[in-house]
Amino acid sequence: MGYKIALQSRIGAGKTIEAGRLIADMVRGASSPPALWIVNGQHRTGGLLRINQVPDPVEDPTAPGELLLREEPFARRRMRAKTVPWRARYGELRWRAETWEAAGRDQNRVFTSGERRVRSGAAREAVLLRSQGRCENPDCLLAVLPYRTTAGQPLLEIDHIDDHAQGGRDHPGAMIALCPNCHANKTRGADRSALRERLRGVAQALDSAVMQQEQDGPRA
């Protein structure tokens, strides 16, 4: 079990020493006086704190704990970021979206100015990852957009094939990444009904393709 003690001191190892004395006061008089290892990470020093056995602090309130500090070399390690193939990440996010759905959380509602179903952030991230920065409408006239968001991401909009507010599934296989023009065409274009049905098959095919490739073998 560990304890975090906040102490103030203006000298280098002052907080470590003060912490040791505070702990000594807390455990003095215990039947089995402990030996505690104290580490000062800022100054890279370690110390062994031996607590004097005093039956009653009233009998000898001045008995201090014995604090020995010495330099301890810290092992140098090269930190490496874990690289996960994007298809593996897609599978993980897809699983999270399905878990969210299976738990019924996709039916939860939040109150804003009105009420709407809570959306799965994992499902949205999975579709963005799958798109690889391209509009997923095969008929898009400008699939690779030159525009970026303020965060530097492709200017894509994640859309549910069927209106989410009307019960559309919140799952990568039922969602698609579209450029603003294709999204507007699907939402209010003259051929929106036909486009929706075409994109339904596209989203399912893309989802299945990624999962199949992941099963065949992890690749970047």
Image (cartoon, rainbow, N blue to C red):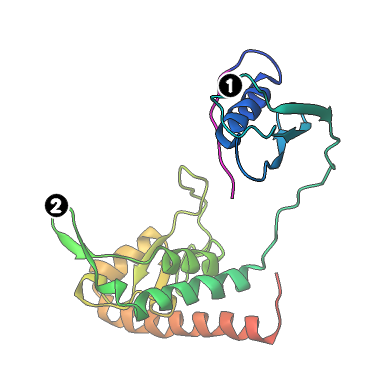
Q: Residue at x 57, y 64 (%)?
A: 132
Q: Is residue 189 visible?
A: no
Instruction: Classify residue 14 as left or right of residue 180.
Output: right
Q: Position of residue 47 (x, y in %)?
A: 77, 32
Identity, as a three-letter code, of the amino acid under mark 2: Ser
Q: Position of residue 124 (x, y in %)?
A: 42, 65
> Magenta span has 6?
yes
Q: Secondary structure at mark 2?
A: loop
Q: Position of residue 115 (x, y in %)?
A: 15, 61
Q: Residues within 10 Å of mark 2 (few under 14, many from 20)?
A: few
Q: Magenta stretch: give its range.
A: 1-8
Quarter of image, res 74: top right
Q: Camera-side residue: 10 or 94?
A: 10
Q: Residue at x 85, y 42 (%)?
A: 75
Instruction: State the quadrant of the C terminus.
Output: bottom right
- Going from the N terminus, do you reach mark 2 or mark 1 first? 1
Res. 157 mark: none
Quarter of image, res 116: bottom left
Instruction: Classify residue 16 as left or right of residue 59.
Output: right
Check disc 1 and report the residue beneath it.
Answer: 61
Label 2 vs label 1: CA separation?
64 Å
Res. 113 mark: 2
Q: Camera-side residue: 207 or 29?
A: 29
Q: Camera-side residue: 36 or 43?
A: 36
Quarter of image, res 158: bottom left
Instruction: Classify residue 37 as left or right of residue 113.
Output: right
Q: Secondary structure at mark 1?
A: loop
Q: Is residue 29 visible?
A: yes
In the image, residue 135 above or below residue 48? below
Identity, as a three-letter code, of the amino acid under mark 1: Pro
> Magenta span has 100?
no
Q: Residue furthest top?
A: 10
